[in-house]
Image: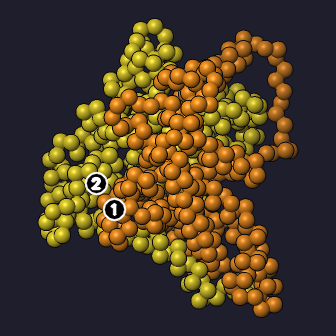
Chain colours: A orange, B yellow
């Protein structure tokens, strides 16, 4: 913030106009708060209610609903599957993006920044949805339908441009004198990267890792079309099946599962926020 | 930045470092985009003879699309969905960023975190939250509406498009809120003070000082929200395109034609149209900003 500037203190003692505008402000804030909070209340109350309905009501407390999750054959397995998918994709993205952004940060060629920028825009244009058919066909031809490998590769390809874009910013701030002295002492590029660069840009790697985890954790479409076996499905697809399969929706199971399935992203957001401060990278989530 | 005296990464190391990312992006991002164009001019199907030996059919898929009332409907629905979400997210995001300016209280923090949670909680969960929220008989939305307004209206059945626009505004506003927040903090406070002291009202100040100086951010937010919304599959989780195709946005249309019905060639043609729209938006954007940040 601009510390040299101070606002003039209003001297008039609450003229009518000011009271009206203050009141308007509080009404607006309350309405906005309600708009964002009320749809979320159900997620907070229903999982702990003895008899959850679709309404958000203060619950008659119980933890019994979580037993439904343990008893359901797909619920816990799907959370484990989500962890597998998210962690594998995250590792691939962080490794590939770290190598690539480091090299791009240290090598100059005409149009480098423009290339990265166009690639970033391209990854927003060619999303999984717009390229659904060729991605399905590609994974099909590679005989990777119904494997995590297929989903991991497709998601990595789509997320990498943004990951490289963010990480290059971190790499650019690293003074090259560190690496130069390492090289003078005979370190190889891989040693420089491992022993000099990675320790310094660790916050950047953490940001990319969390961002990738959050994105993959919630992704629905790719596992939905690329995986076939019910026991391989991640939480997003299993959750969808819980409320669309025929018969009465099991609200005890759905609410408790939603709660468990949401905890990791909320926890990761809080972690990043406390540890590094939630910063904003040119329009990229988390 | 200073010029480097010693090249810290040699040519071969550079190639080796860039290769994995370039390979993944090339195979799973760029190639599929190009392949869409090829598949779009074939009659490829998921099963049967046309799955083994797809024929070249020229523009037949595109001609079929234009004369398919369901496709025309899908384009209309998509445009309305994108326009509605865009207005909702930009206006709400700006409003939040504007009232957050200079406000450092608990209330601000709480509102901000709520908007961010709406944005990061998994799509399948928020979709169900809104199914519950908008339910006719026991949904909280009807319970809160005064008088006959909320009398058992099944919002997802009677006003499906409005419902998913509202849902998507709720879901995505955090992005424009954060972007505009960053933009507003870069507007010199002295400009605003000068304007205030010379008697400008809030609207005048917004119009003459704030909007012009964050114009670039508004353009960026508009483009990215438009691109994301065009490609959004989440409406499927709420309505599955229904009732009676009233929320049949293009991604859902493509999914139904290509994956559910197995008409991969036709689906690819619709994908190509969607890609063309997205590309057009991106080009307009690049012309408007001219230079990358």
Whole-angstrom CA distance, mark 1 to mark 2, is: 8 Å
Place of residue A222 in the rendered image (x, y in percent of width and height, measured from the top left): 41, 56
Place of residue A180 in the rendered image (x, y in percent of width and height, measured from the top left): 78, 84
Q: Is residue A58 above or below residue B28?
A: above
Q: Chain of mark 1?
A: A
Does residue B88 appear anywhere in the picture? no
Q: Chain of mark 2?
A: B
- Indicate the quadrant where residue B275 lies: bottom left
The residue beneath circle 2 is B259
Residue A180 placement, left or right of A48: right
Q: Secondary structure at mark 1?
A: helix
Q: Is residue A175 above or below residue A68?
A: below
The residue at 71%/88% (across/down) is: A188
Which numbered disc covers residue A136? 1
Residue B37 placement, left or right of B99: left
Place of residue A153 in the rendered image (x, y in percent of width and height, measured from the top left): 46, 67
Q: Is residue B236 above or below residue A208?
A: above
The residue at 22%/51% (across/down) is: B261
The residue at 46%/7% (across/down) is: B147
Front residue of A234/A180: it is A234
- Indicate the quadrant where residue A98 lies: bottom right
The residue at 46%/34% (across/down) is: B128
How many residues crowd mark 2 within 10 Å: few (<14), some (14–19), many (20+)? some
Front residue of B216/B224: it is B224
Place of residue A278 in the rendered image (x, y in percent of width and height, measured from the top left): 70, 49
Does residue A79 appear anywhere in the picture? yes
Front residue of B275/A22: it is B275
Establish whether labels 1 and 2 are both on one chain: no
In the rendered view of the protein, which quadrant contains the N terminus of chain A?
A: top right
How many residues crowd mark 1 within 10 Å: few (<14), some (14–19), many (20+)? many
Whether tag 1 and tag 2 are in contact, CB under 8 A, the answer is yes
């Amino acid at each position: 913030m601009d510390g040299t500037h101070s606002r003039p203190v209003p001297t008039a003692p609450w003229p009518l106009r000011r009271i009206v505008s203050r009141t308007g402000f509080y009404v607006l804030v309350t309405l906005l708060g309600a708009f964002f909070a009320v749809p979320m209340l159900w997620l907070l109350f229903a999982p702990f209610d003895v008899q959850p309905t679709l309404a958000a009501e203060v619950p008659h407390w119980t933890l019994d609903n979580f037993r439904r999750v343990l008893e359901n054959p797909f619920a816990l397995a799907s959370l484990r599957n989500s962890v597998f998918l998210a962690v594998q994709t995250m590792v691939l993205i962080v490794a590939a993006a770290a190598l690539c952004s480091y090299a791009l940060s240290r090598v100059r060629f005409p149009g480098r920044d423009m290339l990265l920028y166009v690639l970033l825009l391209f990854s927003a244009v060619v999303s999984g949805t717009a390229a659904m058919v060729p991605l399905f066909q590609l994974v099909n031809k590679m005989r990777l339908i119904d494997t995590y490998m297929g989903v991991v590769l497709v998601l990595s390809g789509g997320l990498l441009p943004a990951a490289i874009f963010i990480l290059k910013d971190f790499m650019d701030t690293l003074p090259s004198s560190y690496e130069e002295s390492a090289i003078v002492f005979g370190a190889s590029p891989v040693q420089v990267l491992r022993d000099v660069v990675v320790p310094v840009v660790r916050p950047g790697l953490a940001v990319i890792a969390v961002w990738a985890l959050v994105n993959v954790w919630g992704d629905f479409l790719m596992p939905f079309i690329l995986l076939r076996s019910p026991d391989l499905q991640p939480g997003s697809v299993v959750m969808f099946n819980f409320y669309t399969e025929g018969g009465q929706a099991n609200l005890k199971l759905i609410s408790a599962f939603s709660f468990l399935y949401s905890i990791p992203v909320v926890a990761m957001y809080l972690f990043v926020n406390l540890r590094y401060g939630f910063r904003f990278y040119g329009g990229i989530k988390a | 930045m200073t010029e480097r005296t010693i090249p810290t990464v040699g040519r071969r190391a550079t190639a080796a470092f860039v290769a994995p990312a370039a390979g993944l992006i090339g195979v799973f991002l760029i190639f599929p985009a190009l392949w869409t164009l090829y598949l779009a001019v074939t009659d490829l199907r998921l099963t049967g003879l046309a799955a083994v030996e797809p024929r070249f059919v020229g523009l037949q898929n595109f001609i079929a699309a234009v004369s398919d009332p369901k496709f025309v409907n899908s384009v209309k629905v998509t445009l309305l969905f994108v326009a509605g979400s865009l207005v909702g997210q930009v206006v709400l995001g700006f409003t939040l960023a504007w009232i957050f300016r200079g406000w450092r209280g608990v209330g601000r923090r709480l509102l901000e975190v709520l908007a961010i949670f709406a944005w990061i909680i998994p799509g399948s969960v928020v979709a169900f939250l809104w199914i519950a929220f908008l339910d006719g008989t026991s949904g909280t939305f009807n319970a809160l509406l005064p008088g006959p307004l909320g009398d058992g209206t099944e919002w997802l059945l009677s006003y499906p498009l409005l419902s998913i626009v509202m849902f998507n505004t709720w879901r995505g506003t955090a992005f424009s809120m954060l972007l505009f927040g960053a933009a507003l903090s870069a507007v010199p406070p002295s400009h605003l003070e000068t304007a205030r002291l010379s008697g400008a009202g809030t609207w005048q100040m917004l119009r003459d000082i704030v909007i012009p100086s964050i114009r670039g951010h508004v353009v960026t937010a508009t483009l990215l929200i438009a691109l994301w919304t065009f490609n959004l599959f989440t409406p499927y989780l709420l309505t599955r395109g229904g009732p009676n195709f009233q929320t049949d946005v293009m991604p859902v249309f493509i999914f139904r034609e290509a994956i559910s019905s197995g008409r991969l060639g036709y689906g690819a043609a619709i994908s190509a149209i969607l890609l063309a729209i997205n590309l057009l938006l991106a080009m307009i954007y690049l012309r408007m900003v001219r230079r990358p940040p």
